[in-house]
Amino acid sequence: MKKMTKENLSAAFAGESQAHMRYLVFAAKAEEEKKPNVARLFRAASLSEQRHATNHLRALDGVKATGDNLQAALGGETFEIDEMYPSYVEVAQSQGEAQARTSMEAALAAEKVHAQLFGQAIQALVSGGDLKIADIYVCSHCGFTMIGTPPDKCPICNTPREKFDRFQ
């Protein structure tokens, strides 16, 4: 693929991915404000943006076999853990931006768990199988991810167990 086309697709993928997430957050806010039809519109637009992003990633040849995808995911998490979030936290701290710092510290803690889980998945694939795991839970506030029954409160942000999302 020619350089400019690849750069354009990469930028479009990033933009569509951000729009997908932004619209999901906007939908939740509309629901909270008792605007179900606006929420529905945001969710529909979010799905459309997700499909655009998916098509762009495929055009970039960014979807491989599961083992390669796990390696890419682990690489992304490792970058966030080792470089991105530590420097972002430092800047937020030095600028007195407490909410930003707290948000990024929580994400950093969750990314460490993601890296561990992706590592376990890679080992399972190397052994010729799939992960042998129970339910997966994600904290609805900070994104802490875990396998098995969650604790009474999130170890990162103290959100109660009842507010964890379950993936079975």
Image (cartoon, rainbow, N blue to C red):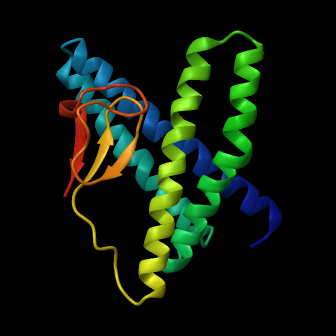
Q: Is residue 30 above or below residue 21?
A: above
Residue 45 image position (x, y, % from top left): 36, 38
Asked whether, in this view, residue 9 is left or right of residue 150, the answer is right
> Within the image, what quadrant is residue 98 found in?
top right
Is 64 in front, or is 88?
Answer: 88
Residue at 42%, 32% in the rendered image: 142
Examine the rendered structure and indicate whether residue 14 appears above or below residue 142.
Answer: below
Q: Position of residue 111 (x, y in %)?
A: 53, 47
Front residue of this view, candidates 157 and 142: 157
Q: In this picture, is 59 found above or below 28?
A: below
Residue 115 placement (x, y as % from top left): 53, 57
Which residue occupies 18% across, 32% down? 162
Instruction: Give how far across and how far down residue 73 sits, in percent.
Output: 55, 62
Q: Which residue is most to the right? A: 3
Q: Quadrant of the C terminus?
A: bottom left
Instruction: Tell me the quarter of the image containing the N terminus.
Output: bottom right
| Residue 155: quarter of image | top left
Judge by depth and name the residue closer to the eye, 16 or 75: 75
